[in-house]
Image: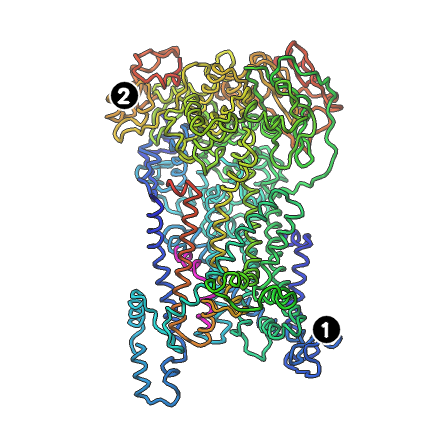
Amino acid sequence: MGALRLVIRRLLASMPLLFLTSALTFVLVSLVPGDPARTIAGQHSTAEQYRLIRGQLGLDQPLPVQYWNWLTQVFRGDLGSSLFSGEAVTSILQNRLPVSLSLILASTVVSGLAGVALGLLSARRGGVLMKIVDGLALFGLAAPPFWLALLVIEVFAVTLRWFPVTGYVPLEEDPGGWAGSLVLPVVSIALGAVAIIAKQTRDSVLDTMNRDFIRVMQANGFSPRSILYRHILRNAALPIVTVLGVLMVSLLGAVVFVETVFAMPGVASLTQQATVQHDIPVIQGAVLYITVFVIVVNLVVDLAYVRLDPRVRTS
Amino acid sequence: MKTTSRLLRRPAAVVAVAWLVLLTVATACAPLIAAHGPLDQDLSHVLALPSASHPLGTDSLGRDLLSRLLYGGQPALLAVAEALVAHLVVGVTLGLVAGYLGGWADTLITRVGDLLFALPAIIIVLVVLSVFPGNLHAAMITFGVLGSPGLIRVLRSRTLGIRQEMYVAAARVCGLSDAQILLRHVLPRLTSTVIVQAALFSAVAVIIQAGLGFLGLGAQPPAPSWGGLVADASQVIDRDPWMLVPAGVPLVLTVVALSMLGDAIRDSAVESWSVSKLATASAPPPVAKEHAEAPVPGALLSVRDLTVEIDGVPVVQGVSFDVMPGETLGVVGESGCGKSVTALGVLGLVPGNGRVTGGRVVFAGTDLTASPTELARVRGSGIAYVSQDPMVALDPTFTVLSQLREAVRRHSGANREQARERVLELLAMVGVPDPEGVAGRYPHQLSGGLAQRVLIALALAGRPKLLIADEPTTALDVSVQKEILTLLHTLQRRTGIAVLIVTHDWGVVATLCHRSLVMYAGQVVEQADVESMFVRPLHPYTAGLLAANPHRAAHGHALTTIPGTVPSPREWPVGCRFAARCPYAGDDCRAAPVALTGPAPARLTRCLHVEELVSEGARL
Amino acid sequence: MTPRPLLQVTELTVEYGQRHAPTLRAADGVSFDVRPGETVGLVGESGSGKSTVARAVLGLTPVTSGRIRFDGADITHANRKTRRALSARLQMVFQDPYSSLNPARTIGQTLAEPLLVHSGERGKPVGERVAAMLERVGLPAKAAERYPSQFSGGQRQRVAIARALMTSAELVVCDEPVSALDLSIQAQTLNLLSDLQRELSLSYLFIAHDLPVVRYLSHRVVVLYRGRVMETGPVDLVYERPAHPYTRALLAAVPDPDPRIRTGRHDEPATPRGASQPTATGCPFAPRCAHVVEICRRERPGLLPVDGVPGGASAACHRAAELTPTGNGTVARAVAVGRPGNAHMEET
């Protein structure tokens, strides 16, 4: 009932975000000193050839018109083609999307599960485990993902030879290889995230434990298991879900580095390469995809809220 | 500044500050420290391990790593500073404006902030770098601005919170201008938040700055940079893993130092104006040895010598009382006297770090203190509990039905459908007008009075013999209060349940209780049936508390008061704990602990001067 | 005749716009006045609008309609400058002694604040005045150097009272000043307020939900329900001979601290108050009233004198005349047409 309306409302509300990012990218790339037409035409082209290419690329039009043209194309599912390979941007992105999505989803699942388990454990046991979680959180936050990636490569790939050093195996080719190729990248991405989730879980579980209704349940003989897993965890879940959502978006940053270190052909490393090459249609396409991803994540978080908190559902 | 000195008393903060200072100074004085230039190649010593001439070793071109680290630190620190300044300027200004002004400015800033917050900052930074290739300044300033929505959110909600504090309203009433209020009341409360946020943001900026260098988007080789060092190390990882250490460890240490500093500042800022009572491990004040009688025959609940400690400090000492079946016993006193702790202590549930350290609780012939399993069994089915504020006493994420059903099934083993029937029965029993409708609601959809009824139904789910009610009417409006008192009375008449009610309200005691217990500073000071206590109190504290009630006072006549305040557990004297506030107190009272005595049948008082009190008809 | 009122509130209406709900009318045509040296008590349950009235008087919340005059001058929509000038004479003591003092400022800094606005005095005279005021409210002068966290609730409330009196206040609005305090501390604070009133000829607008407290301190009382005045008059008259059924219900609900009376000991089924909303045009109390008749739901009763005696009580009830107890405090037993469920709220 309310969920569908919420989805529609949130999707409408996120339209400005799409426009903002695409317009922002558009304006920014229009400032690029280099001229793609000049690059494509080559140094020895005539003025006539150059004008022709500019016309083909639509670069002779005023900026708002260019943006409008691009937008109408986008609505037709056409993101243009790479200035360098000539390949359609949509197909480039389609090929690379599974890599980045695998990384982000796997990292999120790992940090969610491991983080909540570790947090719960340290909330119940306290003491040494609590210190370990704190220390891990500090280290996980402080170790730059690209350095951490090198460290795990050195230890687990170069020295112990447990996992491949670099590369990505598509899931449909070899599921085992796919999983193997993800382990080290996910470890480098998720170490900090696990610690953040563990800390958040511990804090909100401890916080919930001290609330009045828990004492009332204890005093009236509710089973300790039910109090912990049904009541405390459910109430503690809200802030955890929020943090998980924010984390999923911010993992994108780590993914850029990790894809580069492990030479994985993902969207994030594509953006970085396109940045170096000034391949504008690719950058715009990638930013669009990433923005859609962010919108979807936020939507999922909102839906989780509706599921978990009756106050959101009924008001 | 006070906060600074407090900060420096924390070892973690000192280490963090020391590292950051060392780093900054060493970076700034790189030419003086490094023996080699950052670009000096020594091809005879490539990929060398640490040695006297190269303290951190060399890279693949034989360049000194220490030198490259220090010289690379200069652009790194500059980049972080740029990002930080942009972050603070945008974040603090907009956060303050949104939080303090509110209205359309707030709406606008919050909306835009939410949009920016959803942007993946690193991607936008990459786009910026594609526009301004190699321009680390533009990239870091962009990063600072893109990171500001987080700061805006934090500061906005802090400012909003402060703006709604009564002391800001008070300052307004005093005629202070907006500027004065901002300067005196808002900004000082925000400084520590801003510093904490700045430290955490700097930590992130250090990583991003190095990351851009790592991707080759910052300083171009051969110029030294921190990220470049890691990239160089990645090239030779199979030949020289050592290089990962000097390339990464200083980065990690810097980020760790910044986060630790942030945490330490937050902690010490709070400490600076909150009470810092030192936990002196002083011995608990002695108590008079009392004849710990055997439980009264036939008593439902017998508490003997109950002692509860919180953080090693006794807050309840040697409390003994009995509750007979079907009886209502009131526990009266002011806050800090240990009433609630006593009530929870009976159930073995002391809040926070507290625990029952002595005494016995015997319920229906079973010693609960001796057997944790018995205690767990009795909770809910023998003794039930109702807390003070009904609005927070139910789990907000489950319906009334779901919570009550869980309680019913726990205590009866009924199936879902039977349990549902029983829940509706319970709700009808506590006078809920529309049991079916209310059962389907969530706690936030209930009024205070209704929530308290549901809570009582929850407590009755296990058919208990004793109900412990901790200030059950305090949080309610007066007409609802009366409804709840009537309900408790009716339930008691119908089910014969005994009630232990904790209250500070003499009206509640007079209305509901058969007997009453007055507590002061963790001890029972008087116990009597309610009528005798009201007519002829035998402890000066009881007399004073009764007289302080404005209910029967005539207008224009000063109320009788008890001077001073209830001492905190750490300030309890050796002798009578009420002596400092008592008009009858003499040296005898202060000399040694006073024991409970029974000057009249079925009455107990902890006072040496009962005779005087009675003969003077309460001078208080 | 009677002296000119210090504070005169006429037909005050305050509405709060709500984002996803209809406008909430927190105060609805409230009128009363406070004379010099007098205490007027404003009583009601939560949601009755008593705090809203206080905030409106102090300019902390915008007024929708109606008029507020202080010493004859209209201050309903007073600007910042007027308010600054006014703040020397019109002050407030807040309910929560924990939130009303800035924890990061010393007591001395807090107390000096009102002077900052008015005389611009600094240095020694201010310090001396702070010390004198602290001693006047029963705190040691050296308390000025300490932070609020080092004081108990009762001591903080003394500080808050001291702050209100640093300038030459004439009217102090007290919003539930003792409701957060323990019984013995409450009595100390009430005595302090009453001593200060006598010494400094202060007027109080005293807001509380605790009826005995209001009775003890007030000369006249205004009973609010859902933003409207139900009854007003001299405190003894209203308490001894309440003319409005709501006032009677409120008074009857207060548990009497006398075990021989045992007011609450009824065996009637305790039904919570009805959830039905009052009609837009009728008496707001009609859905809960035991004496409700048809006209109550249709027509809103005006606030009219009960006995026609000048200086007597006024009540907003269609049936006030027939229901009001006469002379010696016994209820004139009109035929009750109320629902039995609410009967326990009636004094018997």
Q: Position of residue B173 (x, y in %)?
A: 45, 42
C20 relative to B377 in the view: left or right: left
In the rendered image, which residue does mark 1 sit on? B50
Label 1: chain letter: B
Q: Which residues are magenta?
A: B111-129
| Left or right of residue B367: residue A246 | left
Is disc 1 in the same subunit as disc 2?
no
Secondary structure under tag 1 reads loop
Coordinates of residue A121 in the picture (x, y in percent): 60, 45
Q: Which quarter of the figure has residue B327?
A: top right
Q: Chain of mark 2?
A: C
Residue matched to label 2: C318
Q: CA distance from mark 1 to mark 2?
A: 98 Å
Check if residue B126 falls in the magenta segment.
yes
Determine whether A89 is above or below B63 in the image: above
- Badge 2 amino acid: His
Q: Is residue B61 left or right of residue C247?
A: right
User: In front here: A254 or B498?
Assistant: A254
